[in-house]
Image (spheres, rainbow, N blue to C red):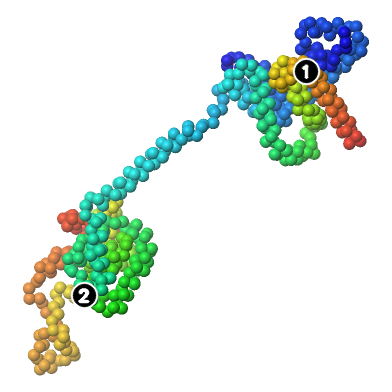
Amino acid sequence: MSHVDDGTLHAYLDGELSPPEAQAVEAHVAQCPACRTRLEEERALIARAGELLARAAPPDRELPPFRPGDVKPPARLWWQVRTPLAWAATIALALGIGTYVGQRRVPQLEPTAPERPTIIADQLARPAPAPGPAAASAPDSASAEQLQRVAERRLRVSKQAASAAVGAVEQKSRQEMLPQIDSIARRETAPLTADGYLASKAAAPVPARPEVLRLRALAGAVNGPPIGVDSARLLLGTDPLVVPDLPIRGMYRGRQLGYSATVIVEQALDSTTVIEVLTGRPSPLQLGEVVVTGAGVARPDSLSPEARALLNTRAVDSLAAAPRPAPAPAADEEKAKRTPSGLFVEVRGPLSPDSLAALKRLLRPLRP
Amino acid sequence: MPGDLAEIYRTTYRALVRFLYRKVWDAERAEDLAQEAFARAVVHKPENARGWLFIVAANMARDEARRAARERRHLTLLTAESQDGTPTSDEVFQEEQERVQVRAALEQLTPRDREVLLLWDSGLSYSEIAGHTGLAPGAVGTTLARARRRLVEAHEAGEKGEHVARG
């Protein structure tokens, strides 16, 4: 039998030979000194290699417990991730639609409100670019009334949103407005009336804020700068009137013809409705009690009564204060707006006259 | 199956960690990979769980080595640092030196020789090693003999080189 090769020797020493193969190796080694020597060399080599490998072993640690439950879950596939995402998107969409519809429904309660301004604007805008001389100067009063009605409805427009947009809006409308005014003035066909101004303004696309301002101009009192409660008391000489238990959103100084001081208190009726409570202190001279006649022939007041008597003839017609012969119905209305203390009080807002009157009955002085 | 696997875990886990350690040279990482290999075995329920575990472990270690190759320079610097650092004791220092020498010797083997040697040291039989490496069963002994000789020779050469360098 030939000598045993290294591989067989290692297999023999490793115990990997079948019993017949192992017996064959043992038989050869028994009669072959060279192979016997080699067998011992290989045995030493195997021991040495094992020893070296044992040095390159990790620190011997306690066997950690077998936890098949700790298996990492396989990574989620994209379509497994997609389902929760779809749910999230659906919910977000539903919420978004709900909010949108909720916002839209309030103005829709008044059916004609959205369309009306456009029609008015068209009607009023027509005179401005019209070539005829009379066109721009003849805004009918019906249009003005319509405009006021529309403007009253538009008061419900959120003032916060309006003021946020006001910078851009005003700049834009002014840019679009000025050429029209210029062209009207250059043609000198007619004086630029307040109605003409409004018409060209209404022609400009947009503006929530200008409409609010217009409403105030039409209603008679214009909001001035915001003021504090103390300033309001100083202006009025007493407490401003408010609807009790309604949150106060702001307080402004107002300017109103015939009143030396006006305070406007903004109060939120609900999230979309704002009312304004006007408290005015009348000026010493009431316009309603003055009648102006014969202004064209006014004479200087420096004349003595005697001289005036000499001049005689139209003295009664000169500029002088005289009680009205009969109080007009309008004067009664004015008186109804006044409190016993002489203050002028009015409640404005996008509500029915009955509601405004009811609110007015609730008014109480704002106590500190 | 989990019962069988638990038994295999008890008998094979340490060998698998050792096998992995000699590939990644990081005890913590070797244990992590071994755990992951067993976790995969629970899911896949392989026929020959022990052989399957070593195949999976070898693949994981290869992936690990590819990733580590990118950080090799950093690793080398770390090793150099730890060698230069003051050892806590001579014994620890000696053990670390020996580990480094064996590692250097192992890395001089051909990949196949090294794989066969490591698998044998992990307790696999010749037939399992043959199935793992694709060698003929009769060639495993020859490969193993060559691998052991080269390991010992490379280690001795390294020690000599070390002594020469020190002397």
* Residue at 24% in and 56% down: A115
In the image, taking residue B104 as reference, residue A173 lies left or right, namely: left
| Distance from the alpha carbon under mark 2 to that under mark 1 | 116 Å
Q: Is residue A358 above or below residue B44?
A: below
Identify the element where label 1 is drawn. Answer: helix
Query: What numbered label is drawn on residue A229?
Result: none
> What secondary structure is marked by label 2?
loop
Asked whether, in this view, residue A139 is left or right of residue B85, the answer is: left
State the residue in front, B140 or A290. Answer: B140
Percent position (x, y) of residue A302?
A: 19, 90
Residue A233 occupies quadrant: bottom left
Q: How many marks?
A: 2
State left or right for residue A19 relative to residue A188: right
* Residue A75 on image: x %, y %: 54, 31
Q: Residue at x 84, y 16 (%)?
A: A6
Q: Position of residue B5 (x, y in %)?
A: 61, 17
Specify the amino acid type for callout 1.
Answer: Ala
Label 1: which residue? B139
**Where on the picture, by quarter, is residue B102?**
top right
Say the numbered circle drawn on residue A134.
2
Image side of residue A263 versus residue A287, left or right: right
Q: Mark 2–mark 1 contact, CB under 8 Å?
A: no
Amino acid type at image mark 2: Ala
Find residue B19 and report its image quarter: top right
